[in-house]
Structure formats: C-alpha cells, structure tokens
Image (cartoon, rainbow, N blue to C red):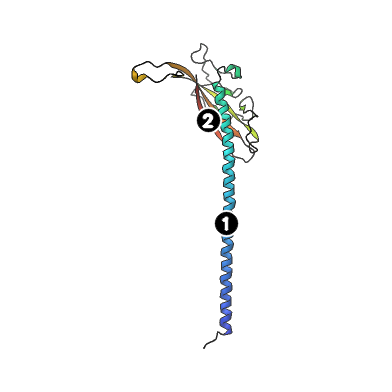
Amino acid sequence: MKHPTPMNMKNQSGVVLIVALVMLVIMSILGITSVRTVALEEKMSTAAHDRSIALQAAEAALLAGQRECEAANRAASGIVLPERSDGASLTYTSTQPAVNNGFAATHDKVLADDWMVTGIDWTNNNQTRELSNTVDLGPLVTNPPRYFIEYRGTALCPSSGTEDSSLAGETETIATCSKFRITARSQPANGRAEVFLQSLYVTN
C-alpha cells in the first residue's frame, strides 16, 4: 500500500487553492454582472415611466389646442387669424410671419413649417400657449406643456350630419372646413424626457 508523499500533498494543496481562486473570480464576475443588469433595468424602467408622463403632458396640450380650434367664435378666444376662404378679405402671406400668441396665421405651403423654425421660443407667451395650471401632471413635469396652432387654409368636407349617398345617385351637401395644425411639447425638467406631438385638426 502506497502512501502519498509530502511533496504530492503539497502539489494537491496548491491545485485546490488555484481552483478556489478561479471559482472566486468567476463568482465575483457573475455578481458584478448581476448588479449592473439590475441597475440597467432600473434605469430603463425609470426612463420609460418618465417618457410616459411627458407623453401624457404633450397629449394634454394637444387636446387643449384641438378644443381651441373647435371653438365657434375664434376671435373671442384671442386668436387672430385670416378670414375663412369663403370670406371677402382673405389674404395669403408671402413672407414667414411671426407666431402671435401661440397662433401662426399662415397657410402658404411654400413657407417653412413654423414648428421647424429655429425662432420659435417655447418659453415665450407671445409665441406659444401654456396649458392651464389646473391640470395636475405630476412632479416630473416642472412646467406646464405648451402648444401653438397653425392655420392651414380650408378644404371641402361633408357637412355635419350628412351621409355619403353618392352611390344612390344623390348629391352630397358640401361645407368649407378650416384646417389647423397643432404642435405640442412637454416642458420637462433638466435631463428629463421631452416629447413633441403634432396633429392636423379639421373643423367647420
């Protein structure tokens, strides 16, 4: 019967130590990776929640703009705009007009879109409208969202309440509708998500 020599026992102890160190390194790497993964998932969840709040803020401003366009008496709401195309004093602008009180009174397709013009100041009350402070959008929205409206001219559209009866050989009643483009922007705190929304709204 052979017995291990002291030298063999020493070699075995050295191998066990090396294996233990390798396992320790592997476990450390796995632990660090897990911590980083959890931190990344937390950041992604926070960013998604932040953007969701910013989106809701921009949607609220967009809805406010649509309600304003729907108002029957636009002059009473403080909006200055050209006469409708069925009016006698319609004029087409030939130069880029300044946005006035959140409303751009132009529908010249040759001109640059107002929402892309660098001169638009989203903090200027004369250029954009602020959503009412009565709407609670949570602590992440430090400033109320803002919007502005562009008059895009008129179009022929079915009058309210009439059905398309062209298949029956009947004449459909046509009305003149006004077109508006509304651009809304959330007003986030520094480093927070920012959302722009835009819609084309038609009303008669």
Q: Residues within 10 Å of mark 2 (few under 14, many from 20)?
A: some
Inspect this view and state whether residue 17 appears.
Answer: yes
Q: Residue 168: horizontal and vertical position, in percent?
A: 34, 18
Check disc 2 and report its element: helix, strand or loop. strand
Q: Position of residue 160 (x, y in %)?
A: 46, 19
Q: Quadrant of residue 117?
A: top right
Image x and y of residue 125, in percent: 64, 26
Instruction: List the residue tagged with mark 1.
Output: 34
Work out whether mark 1 precedes mark 2 in sequence or the reverse, and give the earlier one.
1
Residue 163 location, quadrant: top left
Q: Which mark is residue 198?
A: 2
Residue type at the position of mark 1: Ser
Residue at 65% across / 36% down in the picture? 142
Res 117 visible? no
List the single residue furthest toward the top: 88
Q: Residue 171 lies in what quarter of the image?
A: top left
Q: Is residue 60 above or below residue 177?
A: below
